[in-house]
Image: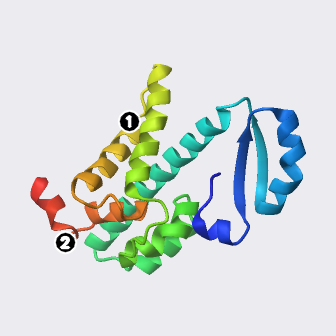
Amino acid sequence: MASSITQAREGKLHLMCAGNEKAFRKAEPLLKELAATVRFIGKAGEAAKVKALVNMVMNINTAGLAEGLGLGAALGLDLKMLREVFAQTGANSRVLETDGEDIQNREHSCFFSAAHAAKDSGIALALARQLGLQLPLAGATKNQYERMIAEGLGELDKSGIAELTFKDRHQASRAKR
């Protein structure tokens, strides 16, 4: 599943299924009642790989958005206006829609914790290492989420990464720089 709690409540899940295709096809009508999209990925374990990649990209997007808004705040820009500009340009993303206002307002009620973000980024990085690939953005993002955990912020939503990037937020972060 690649969806948020809100999407689950609205019946708009995005399900990725793997395993025996015949069993999937039998369950597919029921799954379609639960989800906006249902996709058969392939053999057992393949959907877990896709989910790891979805979460890796989501985590990178969240960190990038936090940095953009954090820098915008430090420059004295109106963050509502900045989010609107982001939404109309190449800076747009699903993360902007789901987390932009929360990042701005420091509303980090947990839908997907920083601890889970670090774990899932680690899963994707392990897959990359097995293939001899280097993913520097994923590595840097994982390090930021691990830093959140080390500073006692691991149970915040992934959007809490903004606490590390906005000036005058989370003072423990400042002392370690």
Q: Amino acid at mark 1?
A: Pro
Q: Earlier in the sequence, mark 2 or mark 1?
A: 1
Q: Is residue 3 left or right of residue 77?
A: right
**Disc marking residue 136:** 1
Q: Is residue 145 left or right of residue 5?
A: left
- Placement of 100 over or under 95, stated as above or below: below
Location of residue 138 (image quadrant): top left
Relative to the observer, which residue lies in front, 96 or 128? 128
**Numbered disc 2: secondary structure:** loop
The residue nearer to you, when weighing 167 against 25, is 25
Is any atom of residue 41 visible in this view?
A: yes
Question: Would you say the residues marked 2 and 1 are in contact, meaning their CB atoms lie under 8 Å apart?
Answer: no
Quarter assignment of residue 105: bottom left
Residue at (42%, 28%) from the top-left corner? Answer: 134
Q: Residues within 10 Å of mark 2 (few under 14, many from 20)?
A: few
| Residue nearest the observer in this picture, 166 or 85 | 166
**Residue to which mark 2 is pinned:** 168
Q: Is residue 45 above or below residue 17?
A: above
Residue furthest out toward the left: 175
- Left or right of 65: which side holds 24? right
- Badge 1 crowding class, 10 Å Cα cut-off, few under 14, some 14 to 19, many 20 or more, is few
Find residue 114 and report its horizontal and vertical position in percent: 38, 56
Q: Position of residue 124 (x, y in %)?
A: 48, 36
At x 89%, y 53%, the residue is 29
**Disc 1, SS:** helix
Q: Mark yes or no: residue 165 visible.
A: no
Residue 95: give x, y in percent of width and height: 53, 62
Give me the C-alpha separation between circle 2 and circle 1: 27 Å
Which residue is located at x 41 percent, y 38 percent?
122
Going by the numbered disc 2, the residue's amino acid type is Asp
